Amino acid sequence: MRATARGWTAAWLVLLVLVQVAAFIVAWRVALHTGLGQWIDTVALTGNRIGQDRIDEPVDRILNAMSVVSLLAATVVIGFIALMRGRIALAITATLLIAGANVTTQLLKHGLSRPDLGIDLERIYAGNSLPSGHTAVAASVAVALVLVLPAKVRALGAFVGAGYAAAAGVATLSAGWHRPSDALTAFLVVGVWAALAGLVLLVTQREQAQISTADAHRVATVVLGVGGVIALVLSGLALGWLTDLRAVAPDALSRRALFVAYAGSAAGIAGTMAVVMALVLAVVHRLVPRHQG
């Protein structure tokens, strides 16, 4: 890859870091430190009771699959795939991405405070749960897998990984473990670490590395990106409709309002992960060249 192209790629990755950090700060401030943010989170969490009996089993299956042991196993598999391809730097970087995203998530969860605004009285002593650790596990593994997979199956891996991570984020909401903002911010943390990992791969890339535009997967990137934006717009419309009802306590809302809050939040979670994965897929062919040189 030419020096000019490498410079533009590095600038794009730095921009992604800054934008996602800014998005995290905005989401954190709104969700934790404003009455409207806490109210929407609480209403969505209250809405998870609708149809909960029907989805308990798949939700438990998804969440129980995410543990320290499964994270370590997935990290080993991802590192093994990279090593089998002869990519030592890629194996190390993918491992650091997973470790960094999950450690950062835990530090933020214990470091950030959630003020009591008198809205979510049921969980008043639960403290802060932002960002979601389970969601960060699923998303970091999904993104790292896309980095190490060969170009031929990378697009498929992106769709499967994004779907799995989105399902994990919605599952934490369905189980009542996390609020929507917890999952959304977890995806942003993973997105920041993905961009940082990209910078590391770019710095360690050899001058003779051969980049092929055939590995760009533009159609898959557009489908993920546009689908994610549409989901976010629908989420915004649904949650915006709820703001007229914010004077009502979450437990006093109608079944329709609770469902709109839950479905709108689920769409926001899925849309955020789709956009993050699209950004990764758009640039990964420049970070992991077809031939190392």
Image (cartoon, helix red, strand yellow):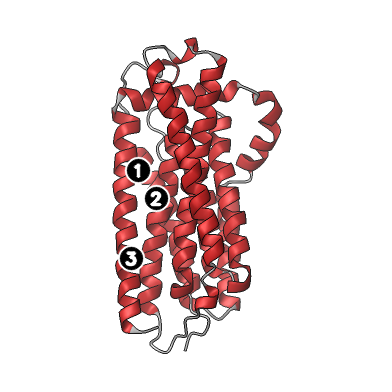
Across and down, in percent, residue 139 comes to 51, 51
Q: Earlier in the sequence, mark 3 or mark 1?
A: 3
Q: Which mark is residue 12?
A: 3
Q: Secondary structure at mark 1?
A: helix
Residue positioned 45% across, 17% down in the render: 122
Q: Amino acid at mark 2?
A: Val
Mark 2–mark 1 distance (CA, rounded to whole Å): 10 Å
- Name the residue that disc number 2 marks: 189
Q: Amino acid at mark 3?
A: Trp
How many labels were placed on the picture?
3
Residue 39 lies in quadrant: top left
Vertical side of 28 occupied by 88: above or below: below
Residue positioned 38% across, 75% down in the render: 202
Vertical side of 246 occupied by 97: above or below: below
Residue positioned 70% across, 27% down in the render: 54
The reply to whether the C-beta atoms of the residues labelled 2 and 1 are less than 8 Å apart is yes
Left or right, 62 with respect to 184, comes to right
Residue 152 versus residue 57: which sits nearer the camera? 152
Left or right, 14 with respect to 42, comes to left
- The residue mark sitting in front, 3 or 1, is 3
- Name the residue that disc number 1 marks: 108
**For mark 3, does the 10 Å Cα neighbourhood hold few (<14), some (14 to 19), or many (20 or more) residues?**
some
The reply to whether the C-beta atoms of the residues labelled 3 and 2 are less than 8 Å apart is no
Q: Amino acid at mark 1?
A: Leu
Across and down, in percent, residue 239 comes to 44, 28
Q: Earlier in the sequence, mark 2 or mark 1?
A: 1
Residue positioned 41% across, 55% down in the render: 191
Q: Secondary structure at mark 2?
A: helix
Residue 212 versus residue 162: which sits nearer the camera? 212
Residue 177 visible somewhere in the drawing:
no
Across and down, in percent, residue 130 comes to 40, 37
